[in-house]
Image (cartoon, rainbow, N blue to C red):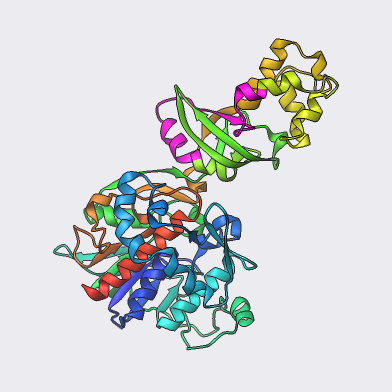
Amino acid sequence: MKPDVIVVGAGAAGIFAAWRAASLGAKVVLLEKTSRIGTKILISGGGKCNICHDGPIEDVLSPFRQNEARFIRPSVYRFPSTSIVPLITDRGIEVYTRPDGRIFPVHQTAKDVVAVLKLLLEEAGVWVYLDSPVEDLIIENDTIKGVKIGESKEVGRRIPMEKTQYGAKALLSEALTISDRHDRIDATELYAENVIVCAGGSSYPNSGTTGDGWKWLKSAGHTIVKPRAALAPIYLAEPQVDLSGVALRNIVLKARGAKEVARWSGDLLFTHLGVSGPCALGVSRLVAEALETQAVRLEVDLVPNTKEEALTNRFLTENPKTTVSKFLQEFLPESLVAPFSSSCDINPLTTFGQLDRKARNRLVQNVKSWYVGEVRHVPLEKGEVVAGGVSLDEVDPKTMGSKIVSGLYLCGEVLDIAGPVGGYNLQAAFATGFVAGESTVST
């Protein structure tokens, strides 16, 4: 068997790259080292799957760093959310858009989204081999020739590609099922004139993204920008273990070094190792970078929509009989009232009539800048995505083609792209995968 296109990695980018190439008539083989497709999609959005981001394309691009936005702009314009969403909704997934632009399934989960993506591969006739790890690229005279396939703990097997038409219920319950029939790849080398590498980065290595692609691409002559954590939890030097599981809502998390490093609005979750949740993920990339040169601490503004002066005036006019505890429960979980009051050196049962000026000032300062802790570490392997990867200067943004190896295409997280939380990263993966797949047929 000699396919027209080999796609390495059945994640978000690989699925759309394979689907697009096959839908244009190419014979496509999709190789996945693990036993299932879309593993990282399954854990996206806390298992709910933040499919992509709604709104004008320039609004989708603006949260990315300038060079990243410039690179993915052609792809996102070619395959916007208005093209992505119908592919999913037409196959049984109902979605809704949150006020912040994030698009989620209404009733289903990430597993159901992956089921739909598998159906796309079936419809296009993609040959999907699981448990089929690629070990290296075959390159001759700066031209791709194919890939080397290593041994797996299990027999490489193909998802059967019958043209089954699933109803909505059947789709969601059966579409991820693998047939008992097995087709083994006996060859240790597979050849094609076009190879798309979308093997991911190195976050969540249990999902199969262990940085393999970077090793092959570096050997091929590509520059690998240093990987750093992004969209990751933050570990603290002295985590507040007794607060693990407690969440703060609608706050602003501020990371400070010699000056402010980053800030993010939303929710924050305390963990046994530090903090997580959207706010922690939102600042994690900049915090990881700052930690290389300075100490970083975290602070929380509990009432970001109220200025310090207005808060001070409210304290002065508060009912003298109101206790600090009762007041704090307006914007703090009850379990946080005692530790917060302690950090202000105030008894929570103290009434506002008993507070002196210094105590009121401490309360105001802590409400606006509550110290959470010193950052110890931002674990790269726990991030939803990783910053760093193949230098964008070495890839054509209009085709995803390598500027170093002819016939080689790169897309998804293997590239030096890392957007914020909100569906941006899946959208970038879908779009760059789409363009890579299309380019193998149209070029």
Using residue 287 as the reference point, say whether residue 401 is left or right of it: left
Per the rendered image, the range of residues in magenta is 283-311
Compared to residue 292, the image places residue 126 above or below, namely below
**Extreme-left residue of the structure:** 141
Tell me what residue is drawn at x 23 percent, y 60 percent. 402
Question: 73 or 18, which is in the foreground?
Answer: 73
Quadrant for residue 188, please give it. bottom left
Residue in the foreground of this view, choosing between 116 and 322: 322
**Tally of numbered tags:** 0
Q: Residue at x 43, y 80 (%)?
A: 184
Residue 170 located within the stretch drawn in magenta: no
Instruction: Judge whether residue 233 can be spotted in this image.
Output: no
Residue 279 location (% of width, % of height): 56, 41
Position above or below: 230 against 85: above
Q: Residue furthest right?
A: 321
> Where does residue 417 sit, x and y in percent of width and height?
37, 50
Is residue 326 among the parts visible in the rendering? Answer: yes
Q: Residue 290 in magenta?
A: yes
Location of the C terminus (image quadrant): bottom left
Q: Name which residue lies at 58% across and 64% down.
A: 96
Q: Nearer the viewer, residue 357 or 164?
A: 357
x, y (%) of residue 337?
76, 30
Q: Position of residue 369 (x, y in %)?
A: 60, 25
Quadrant the N terminus occupies: bottom left
What residue lies at 40% left-to-right and 65% top-to-bottom?
Answer: 9
